[in-house]
Image (cartoon, rainbow, N blue to C red):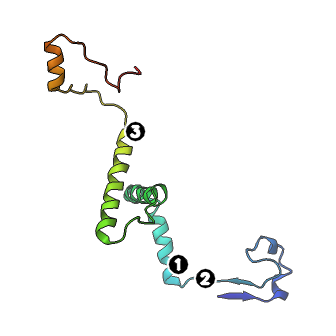
Amino acid sequence: MVRFAKSQCRPCPVRTQCTPPPTALARWAFPPRELRDLQLRVRAEQKTPEWKTRYAVRSGVEGTVNEFAHGHGMRRCRYRGHGKAHVQHVLTAIAVNIERLSGLPPTEETPTSRRPTAFQNYLDQRDIPRPKSWRTLGS
């Protein structure tokens, strides 16, 4: 820790750029040499492509955790007890996965059509027109 008295600090030409207000005493803390060397080594390592690749995974995970905490209200639980809280977390995770998958572009494959129901077979055998599905009424 380094301290400067007001008489030493006030005449400084760059005093206005200091973090403490100009009326306060200036104090700076320097880490021990071992910690400083460790910081320099880690900061240099962070510039390598290998570190950035490893960190990309962590970044994705932290983004997901942040989405759960802030976007889906997972900081508070609606239920009491570990079992019920776990069910809430699992269901929320399923909902988020469905939400994410719905945003994906459609695949190249055409979906296979479902087999007709017994009622649809009955209508087809008697040449009765099928009513349109409520899903296709607007199209």
Amino acid type at circle 2 is Phe
Residue 103's tag is 3
Q: Is residue 26 left or right of residue 56?
A: right
The image shows residue 60 at horizontal and vertical percentages of 40, 55
Q: Are marks 2 and 3 in contact (CB under 8 Å)?
A: no
- Label 3 crowd bin: few (<14), some (14–19), many (20+), radius 10 Å: few
Q: Nearer the viewer, mark 3 or mark 1?
A: 3
Asked if residue 2 is positioned above or below residue 130 in the image, the reply reads below
Seen from the viewer's position, the closer of residues 75 and 123 is: 123
The image shows residue 45 at horizontal and vertical percentages of 44, 65
Residue occupying image coordinates x 29% and y 27%: 108
Residue 36's tag is 1
Q: Are marks 1 and 2 in contact (CB under 8 Å)?
A: yes
The image shows residue 131 at horizontal and vertical percentages of 29, 18
Seen from the viewer's position, the closer of residues 129 and 65 is: 129
Q: Secondary structure at mark 2?
A: loop
- Label 1 crowd bin: few (<14), some (14–19), many (20+), radius 10 Å: few
Residue occupying image coordinates x 50% and y 74%: 39
Q: Are marks 3 and 1 in contact (CB under 8 Å)?
A: no
Camera sees residue 21: yes
Residue occupying image coordinates x 35% and y 49%: 95
Amino acid type at circle 3 is Gly
The image shows residue 15 at horizontal and vertical percentages of 80, 75
- Specify which label sits upstream in the sequence, 2 or 3: 2
Amino acid type at circle 1 is Arg
Mark 2 lies on residue: 30
- Label 2 crowd bin: few (<14), some (14–19), many (20+), radius 10 Å: few
- Specify which label sits upstream in the sequence, 1 or 2: 2
State which quadrant residue 84 falls in.
bottom left
